[in-house]
Image (tube, rainbow, N blue to C red):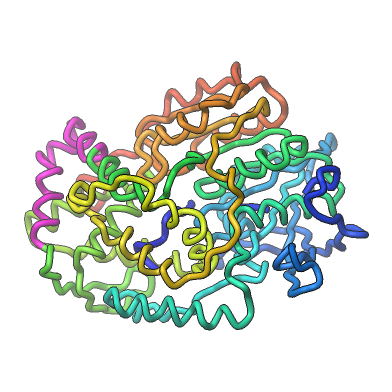
Amino acid sequence: MPRLLTILLSPVLLSVVALGAGPAAAAGPEFKPCRLQNPAGISSVKAECAWLTVPEDRAKPQGRQLRLRVARIPAVGSRKQPDPLTVLAGGPGMAASVMYTSTTAAFARINQDHDILLVDQRGTGESAPLNCDFDEEDTYNADDDRLQELVLACRDTLAKKADLRFYTTSVAVRDLDAVRAALGYRQLNLYGVSYGTRVAQHYLRRYPANTRRVILDGVVAPDAVLPEGIALDAEAALRQILERCRKDRACSGSFPNPLADYQKVRGRIQGSPVDVEIADPRTGERRKIKFDALQLAIVLRLNTYTPQSTALLPLALSQAARHEDYRALAAQALMAARPMQKVMSMGMHNSVMCAEDDPRVDSRPIDRNQMAATFIGTAQLDGIRRLCAAWPRGPVDPDLFNVVVSNTPMLLLSGGNDPVTPPAYARRAMARLRNARHIEVPGMGHGQLGLPCMDRIMADFIRGDDVKTLDTRCLGALQPMPFFTTPAGPAP
């Protein structure tokens, strides 16, 4: 579903012939010059693009065929290495090519010696996308029944051109290895973020001989049931942020009790939406919206993803709590929610969640009272359950949720204040990784790719440095962005 139901963002994907996981193409795909467009339309990336055709259902190789869009950014240095870095995006539902156009600088050092390989996971980007064509105004103000109606209409429309069962992680990793084989790469290096870490771990599990090195950023533990912990993890991250404000002299000087401000705002709008008129932060047009508990949850959840957006929260909460001025919160809700609909393939998102995570919810004890006490509450879990009751479920490998056992060099990255994939997830994933290192960066959110000096650390690792002795001292000097104490910015 649009808005709150999206599980992971970011900030995804795709059979060694020797292992018999799928036929190799008779000839490699033909690459042609292309440009990858940033979703905001402000920049583009020069690349070369090709298509690889694969069966939608591998059990029916002569049945419906899909075209996977493959993009490659060739290494620019003179010492090109034979193994590319493959970027696996989050979501589920974001395309690798879309993610890369917003993060090119972070991969520039690696691109000196390695091709960057981007495979839009089936159902995303240009690879048979499963896009739900929602009207923005309709979804923004819709109630639960209307959202369900929209999602089911999307399901029925997509089902005319796709079998929605065959867009799961288990199918996608076979696609990715088919691409590897067709392009003649012996091994891949993998960078996965958020949901992309699930794809990366499963690719490593299926094709260990074809995997050289792996970076997992914002790690989804293999045994994690994604809807289960979202509300509790997001609440914990928010409270850590507000506590950091309380302990910061400048922030607490302006907002002595940020937790009380948060609780006051939540209590005030529970069941009683506030009418807010604001200038749309993107268009400047005047808009009237009803700011309710769902909009607050959008702001609090998505604005805890990065230290930059986190820096605004105590100020916005204080304005609402003390002056009943909800304009800053409402503007942030619009800013946070709108980009999701432009970059996420919600049909693919639903196919993954409903096949892989929803069936396991009932196997875990859930304290609904504890969940209801969070700002997300039970709405997300209940919405996913309603959606998945009517969404087709596809194939899931029985070992998808097993902890990976591997000697492959792996670098795991976590933000100390990650509201989606907290560091505990990475520690669980580390259980049987024999040549891995986990780096936790205090005060940071979801995805460490854009941190200063992280590009150098990743490049050193991909180049071949020992993960256990990798020089990460530069991270010790990093601090989260200071909190805004006025609309003009942080205190001097």
Residue visible at 78% across and 44% down in the picture: 75
* 303 sits to left or right of 209: left
Q: Quadrant of residue 7?
A: bottom left
- Magenta-colored segment: predominant secondary structure: helix
Please indicate, yes or no, whether residue 86 appears anywhere in the rendered image: yes
Q: Magenta residues? A: 240-268
Which residue is at 14% across, 70% downward? Answer: 273
Query: Which of 114/174 is in front?
Result: 174
* Residue at point 37%, 30% (across, down): 442
Instruction: Decide if residue 237 is on the left or right side of residue 170.
Output: left
Magenta region includes residue 250: yes
Whether residue 308 is situated above or below residue 133 in the rendered picture: above
Q: Position of residue 450 (x, y in %)?
A: 51, 42
Position of the C terminus, as image quadrant, is top left
Residue that appears at 41% across and 68% down:
389
Q: Residue furthest right?
A: 26
User: Considering only vertical position in the picture, is 65 above or below 50?
Assistant: below
In the image, taking residue 206 as reference, residue 438 lies left or right, namely left
Side of 125 relative to 446 (left or right)? right
